[in-house]
Image (cartoon, rainbow, N blue to C red):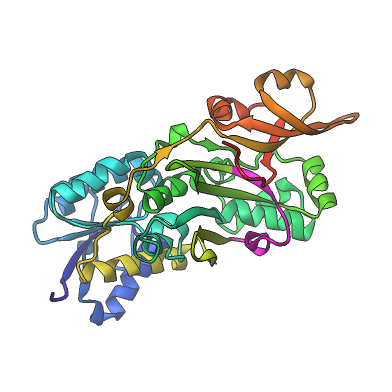
Amino acid sequence: MARQKLNIGLFGFGVVGKGLYDVLEKSPALDSKVSKICVKQKIKRSLPDEMFCYDPDDILEDGGINTIVELIDNSDDAYYIVKKALQKGKNVVSANKKMLAENLSEMVALAKENDVSLLYEASACGSIPVIRNLEEYYDNDLLLSVTGILNGSSNYILSKIFDNNESYSDALKKAQELGFAESNPTFDVDGFDSLFKLIILTMHSFGVVVSPDDVLNYGISNISEFDINYAREKGYKIKLVAQVERLRDNKIALFVLPRFVTRDKYIYNVEDEFNGVVIKGVAYDKQFMFGKGAGGHPTGSAVLSDITALGHHYRYEYKKANYFEGFTYFKEGTIEVYLRYSNSDVLKNFDFKSVSEEYHGPKFNYKIGFMRLDKLIAIKEKLRSLDVFLAATGKALNY
């Protein structure tokens, strides 16, 4: 099949958008060009004014543009753009993990219905080609789990805490100054970014679409010096870890939690703004993928890879969803957690099935024991407002 010529309408002209435009201009072998760029504000830019438009429909209604590349932050705007582009029969490359995670079933169905391609490698782990590998290399039913550090901002903060002895507030401030964290860092440090990426990876790992609202995500914003010292004394680091795991009887479980990580784990040495993903299977045991998960160039490389793939008529086949026996999401398993608290009144929110370790001090207390995932999911919005810190110990899920 001959290579497809891509006439691109680009949404967003920030760091990634500019970098992508430059690469496409310098790489004629890709047989792709940006015809129009949609931005929100009319300001002086490096390209001629006629390259820009300010109404999405100027691009979406243009029959000469066959490919949309969406690189904007606002998930509602991204939803409108991607949905209409697919309905208009245009190929789409998107990096908006929130929009995709919240609307994955609809977007996949629209792409199939209109016989076009929807690619989104840049939405998951920046420069790490994890989606394509799950689609192509791990396209069988031997996969057991996908576990990883999926958010570079929170990992940078935790690296500064454990490697440089910085406080959480100082490490966060530095991350914001370097552009790794937003002025409102909730999306990153409370595990939402990791959650949306995990939803996407779960689809390509096990063929199941799970609502983000129905999955436990809890981050690092409540971490204290007590928790950090506890981890150090035990020889652990704390990492914000996302995991989807295959259980027996075609069930899967998924969650995002801070985790105590021992030196023998691959992700122990994933530092700064890097991401690391461990893929475990029946025949190949563990395989590790490592790379920068955020920033203009890493994200741009993933977008460029999708554009190149589109030129060769590539599409996700969603093999796990279409060709293998269906998996179901199981929330009733129990997970061992460390719960640090000050006031014992908060314990009424937590139903421990068993307790293996307990400590009571003058200022802080903790319990380590097993809790059901569904009970934690039920209070996940409340969790962040409680004076507690919750972390997984790393022990296997019980079910």
Say if the magenta span includes residue 268.
yes
Q: Is 349 on the left or on the right of 33, as rendered?
A: right
> Of residues 21 and 103, which is closer to you in this image?
103
| Residue 70 in view (yes/no) | no
* Quadrant housing the C terminus: top right
Q: Residue at x 59, y 44 (%)?
A: 189
Which residue sits at x=76%, y=40%?
224
Residue sticking out furthest to the right: 362
Q: Quadrant of the N terminus?
A: bottom left
Point out the stretch of residues depicted in magenta. 257-273
Image coordinates for residue 388, horizontal then vertical, percent: 71, 31
Image vertical order of residue 106 relative to residue 141, above or below: above
Position of residue 3 measured from the top left corner of the image (x, y, whole percent): 16, 75
* Residue at 71 percent of width and 62 percent of height: 264
In the picture, measured across the screen, residue 41 lies left or right of residue 2, that is right
Q: Is residue 256 visible?
A: yes
Residue 163 x %, y %: 76, 60
Residue sitting nearer the eye, 351 or 298: 351
**Would you say residue 395 sits in the magenta stretch?**
no
